[in-house]
Amino acid sequence: MSTLEIKKELHEFIDKGDASTIRGFYDMLKSYLYQAENDKMIAEAEADIKAGRVLTHQEVKDIVATWKK
């Protein structure tokens, strides 16, 4: 099944669904996308750590201090 066909079928499910089903689907999808983004950020952070791209505590404090100006 192509992506276009899946999207069409999802739209049909949404059009036919009741409020409770739609809300449940929405909450589930939103939660999944939020978790996927978090997983991506964690993977990027782990790669930075392994590659030695880290900051000292003082460097972080200096960066944050510039935000307050």
Image (cartoon, rainbow, N blue to C red):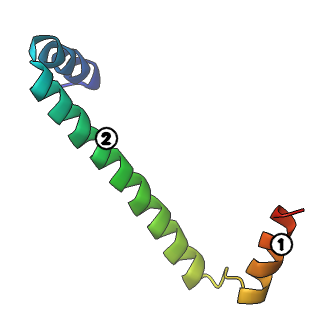
Q: Nearer the viewer, mark 1 or mark 2?
A: 1
Tag 1: Cα neighbours inside 10 Å, few (<14), some, or many (≥20)?
A: few
The answer to whether 48 appears left or right of 5 in the picture is right
Q: Nearer the viewer, residue 30 or 49?
A: 30
Residue at position x 9%, y 12% from top? Answer: 16
With respect to residue 69, does 45 lie above or below? below
The residue type indicated by label 2 comes to: Lys
Q: Secondary structure at mark 2?
A: helix
**Nearest to N terminus: mark 1 or mark 2:** 2
Q: Secondary structure at mark 1?
A: helix
Q: Nearer the viewer, residue 25 or 43?
A: 25
The residue type indicated by label 1 comes to: Ala
Residue 17, quarter of picture: top left
Q: Position of residue 50 (x, y in %)?
A: 55, 84
Q: What residue did someone put label 1 on?
A: 65
The label number, if any, that marks residue 30 in the structure image: 2
The answer to whether 38 appears left or right of 10 in the picture is right
Q: Position of residue 59 (x, y in %)?
A: 79, 82
Tag 2: Cα neighbours inside 10 Å, few (<14), some, or many (≥20)?
A: few
The answer to whether 64 appears left or right of 44 in the picture is right
Q: Position of residue 68 (x, y in %)?
A: 83, 64
Asked whether the viewer can see residue 20, the reply is: yes
Residue at position x 14%, y 21% from top? Answer: 19
